Structures are given as C-alpha cells and as structure tokens.
C-alpha cells in the first residue's frame, strides 16, 4: 500500500485548517469548465484558470503548485500514488493528470448535498462539523477517465483496484485506513448516513 502520500496530504490539510479557523479548503469541483475559470477560488488541489496548458507558450500549466495545500507539501509527486498507471487510454483522456486522489464533495456547504456550483465557489463546512471517522479523500477508479475531471467526487464514483485487496482512505481526523472493496461498496449502497455519505445537514448524509 502507498499510504504515505495521503498521510502527507492529510497533514497539510490539518495545517491548513489551523491557519483558517477550521474551514475546509474548496474542493475543486465544477468539472472541466471549472478548471479553466479564473474567477473561481483556489482549492485543495489547484487554482482554476491556472492549471491546464495554455497561455503564452503553455505557461499556465501549474498543476497543483497553486493549490492551497501545496505550500505545505512542496512536491508534485505527493499527489500521485506511485502505482497509478499513466500509460493508459483512461489517463490520456483524464482532465486532471497530477493526482490519484479526490476530495469528498460532502464538504460543500449548501442547502443540498453535492452542490457542485456552491463548491466551485468555495463554499465549505468546518472540519469540526463532521465526525472524526468520516472520509475526506480516497482513490477513485483510474480506469474511468471522467472520475478525474476535477478535484472532488461523490463516494459512488468508484474505488481503485490497483492495490489488490482494497484502497486507502484519508479520514477527517487526519489518519488513513485501508478499506476492502466489499466494505466500501456496502457503505456506498447503505441508504443511511455513514462515513462516506456524511453531508452534515441531512439525515441520510446525501
């Protein structure tokens, strides 16, 4: 398992919370159009409008280096699982080519869960509004290119199989844990609020 990268991302996240009154970073949602919109705020992963190749001589390709966690991390490679294959058709079609991880869109503060428009504008809950055991980051299925169209997803948008028995989740309290596929998809199918479906302002977490 390659859990060290997520541990470092979670440490950076915890440091960011300490500097920002416990407010969670914007999740970088909004899809491909959100990635290129300079009016949107920087999120955990990148700064919209300054992330993809473009501008004079392609100089806008900053990857994660203008994201809010980068000052604490300082290296692009931390955002990528070493086992994530980059020689596949899915990788070629992926919009985001510098992360193996996504943030849970449940962090978006709105009147309804997974409000991608509100998330793109940077509306988020405080970390303390979640249970310490709720999921913040995970590794989605890299064989589906559209799971990497921005920096956030819903829990039902896949789980990688590259580690053999399960995958590593990044948890709100700053630790990582291994979840087996069967358990993960049981939680995805569970109609009740749980550690994956954890939107604070609804009874069922979604």
Image (cartoon, rainbow, N blue to C red):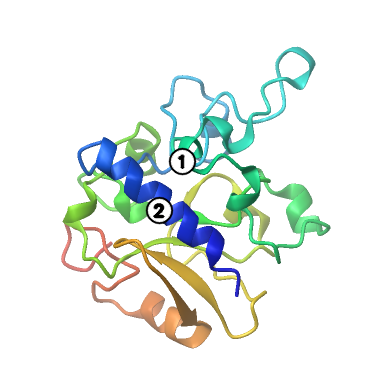
Q: What is the number of the mark on residue 119? A: none
SS state under label 2 = helix
**Residues packed near mark 1 inside 10 Å, few (<14), some (14 to 19) or many (20 plus):** some
Q: What is the number of the mark on residue 11? A: 2
Residue depicted at 79% across the width and 16% down the height = 57
Residue depicted at 58% across the width and 56% down the height = 147
Locate the C terminus and report the quarter of the image it occupies.
Answer: bottom left
**Marks 1/2: CA–CA distance:** 8 Å
Question: Which one is in front, 204 or 100?
Answer: 100
Q: Which residue is mark 1?
A: 72
Residue depicted at 18% across the width and 54% down the height = 128
Regarding residue 29, the answer to whether it shows in the image is: no
| Residue 16 place in picture, x, y as percent | 34, 41
Mark 1 or mark 2: which comes first in sequence? Answer: 2
Q: Is residue 43 left or right of residue 149?
A: left
Regarding residue 151, the answer to whether it shows in the image is: yes
| Residue 193 place in picture, x, y as percent | 24, 72
| Residue 187 place in picture, x, y as percent | 37, 79
Question: Which one is in front, 22 or 53?
Answer: 22
SS state under label 1 = helix
Q: Residue furthest right?
A: 87
**Residues packed near mark 2 inside 10 Å, few (<14), some (14 to 19) or many (20 plus):** some
| Residue 96 place in picture, x, y as percent | 64, 44
- CB under 8 Å between discs 1 and 2: yes
Q: Is residue 145 left or right of residue 155?
A: right
Locate the N terminus and report the quarter of the image it occupies.
Answer: bottom right
Q: Is residue 182 left or right of residue 58?
A: left
Q: Quadrant of residue 91?
A: bottom right
């Amino acid at each position: 398992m390659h859990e060290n990268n997520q541990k470092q991302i979670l440490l950076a996240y915890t440091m960011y919370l300490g500097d920002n009154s416990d407010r969670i970073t914007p999740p970088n949602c909004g899809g491909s159009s959100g990635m290129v919109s300079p009016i949107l705020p920087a999120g955990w992963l990148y700064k919209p409008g300054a992330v993809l190749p473009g501008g004079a001589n392609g100089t806008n390709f900053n990857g994660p280096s203008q994201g809010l966690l980068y000052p604490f991390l300082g290296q692009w490679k931390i955002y990528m699982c070493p086992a994530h294959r980059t020689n596949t058709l899915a990788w070629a079609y992926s919009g985001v080519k510098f992360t193996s991880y996504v943030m849970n869109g449940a962090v978006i503060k709105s009147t309804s869960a997974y409000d991608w428009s509100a998330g793109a504008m940077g509306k988020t809950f405080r970390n303390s509004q979640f249970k310490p055991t709720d999921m913040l980051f995970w590794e989605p299925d890299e064989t589906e290119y559209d799971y990497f169209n921005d920096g956030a997803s819903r829990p039902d948008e896949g789980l990688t199989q590259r580690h053999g028995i399960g995958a590593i989740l990044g948890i709100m309290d700053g630790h990582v844990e291994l979840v087996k596929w069967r358990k993960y998809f049981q939680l995805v199918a569970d109609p009740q609020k749980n550690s994956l479906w954890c939107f604070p302002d609804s009874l069922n977490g979604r």
